[in-house]
Image (cartoon, rainbow, N blue to C red):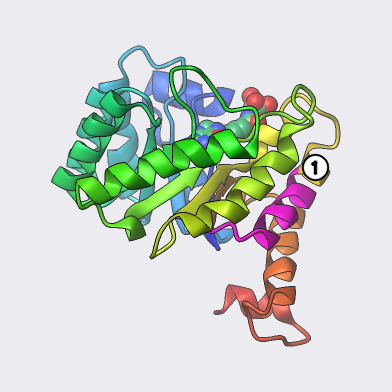
Amino acid sequence: MQIIGELINGMYKKVGNAIKDADPKPIKALALAQIEAGANCLDVNCGPAAKDQVEAFKWLIKTIREVTPVKLVIDTTNLEATETALKCAPQSIINSTTADPQKMEAVFGLALKYNSEVIALTMNKKGIPRNKEERLELAAGIVTYCSQIDFDLNKLYLDPVILPVNVAQLQAMEVVEAVRDFKILSTPPPKTVVGLSNISQRTHQRSLINRIYLVMLIEAGLDAAILDPLDKNLMQAMIATELLMNKHIYCDSFLEAYKNR
Ligand code: THG
């Protein structure tokens, strides 16, 4: 599975302050720690604190690039900041577009220009769907648009949008089943991604809820997740699930073997 580290996000005080003070140390440390823990991509989100998103992204990407060439996931709704980020780091993953036609036109336009991949959220101006069927309908619209503009479906990630279980308990299974059903929309099938930690925001036992939900999503065919790779129990649950789904060769020391794969 593709593991996208979530920790370079201005939502975290430490990161928000580092951006504000232009202090590279915490950012570099978070980049390296997440990769060491198994992340193969890094989400980059400057959060609500950054006054100037364009400058914040320029600085963040330059800082991260001083320690690693890993693939970046550009997490912002600001199109100008997205383009600036892509100039610094082409072939990144744009996070994200919605299913709204105008937004798709702008975002997929940038993706074609910079040879980038795209995360498309199955939501629109009306908000986040209430069930699997509405998510599928929006996903179908996104896939159809990609075919029309000849966007390589291998570069598309569909995100069914996870809501916190404490405010939307009925949605958790709708998202799991959406992940399963997105696969029938096209050949090649679109990839799927989620922002895992959304599920446990403001709940007790966050780590437990995150890892059980990740297991359910992987079983449904999830390809990638934005998550906290420093959560050891979470990473071990992921590896064990993939092992039981026959995605890795079994050995007695499979946790060790995964690191050296
Ligand atoms: N889909 C896509 N991108 C996303 C999301 C998604 N990007 C953002 C988010 N959701 C995924 N990233 C996070 C990062 C952190 C948290 C949740 C999701 C989180 N943070 C703590 C909190 O809010 O409680 C912060 C605690 C602190 O301040 O220390 O939970 O769904 N495509």
Quadrant containing the C terminus in the rendered view? bottom right
Question: At label 1, which amino acid type do we have?
Answer: Ile
Question: Could you say which quadrant of the image residue 174 lies in?
Answer: top right
Q: Ligand 1 lies in which image quarter?
A: top right
Q: Tell me where the magenta segment starts and ends, as one range.
A: 210-223
Q: In the rendered image, is residue 118 in sight?
A: no
**110 lies left or right of 13:** left
Task: Give the x, y percent position of residue 148.
Answer: 22, 46
Give the residue displayed 49% in from the left and 25% down from the top: 10
Give the residue displayed 46% in from the left and 46% down from the top: 158
Task: Give the x, y percent position of residue 196.
Answer: 63, 42
Badge 1: few (under 14), some or many (20 or more) residues near its Cα, within 10 Å?
A: some
Is the residue at mark 1 in contact range of ligand 1, meaning its CB lies under 8 Å from it? no
- Helix, strand or loop status at disc 1: helix
Task: Give the x, y percent position of residue 73.
Answer: 39, 44
Against 120, residue 71 (above or below) is below
Give the residue displayed 75% in from the left and 82% down from the top: 253
Quadrant containing the N terminus in the rendered view? bottom right
Residue 259 vs residue 167, the one in the foreground: 167
Residue 186 vs residue 107, the one in the foreground: 186
Q: Is residue 187 magenta?
A: no
Q: Is residue 214 magenta?
A: yes
Q: In the rendered image, is residue 147 in sight?
A: yes
Hey, which residue is sitting farthest left in the picture?
A: 113
Against 243, residue 77 (above or below) is above
**87 lies left or right of 75:** left
Against 130, residue 214 (above or below) is below
Secondary structure mostly seen in magenta is helix
Residue receiving disc 1: 209
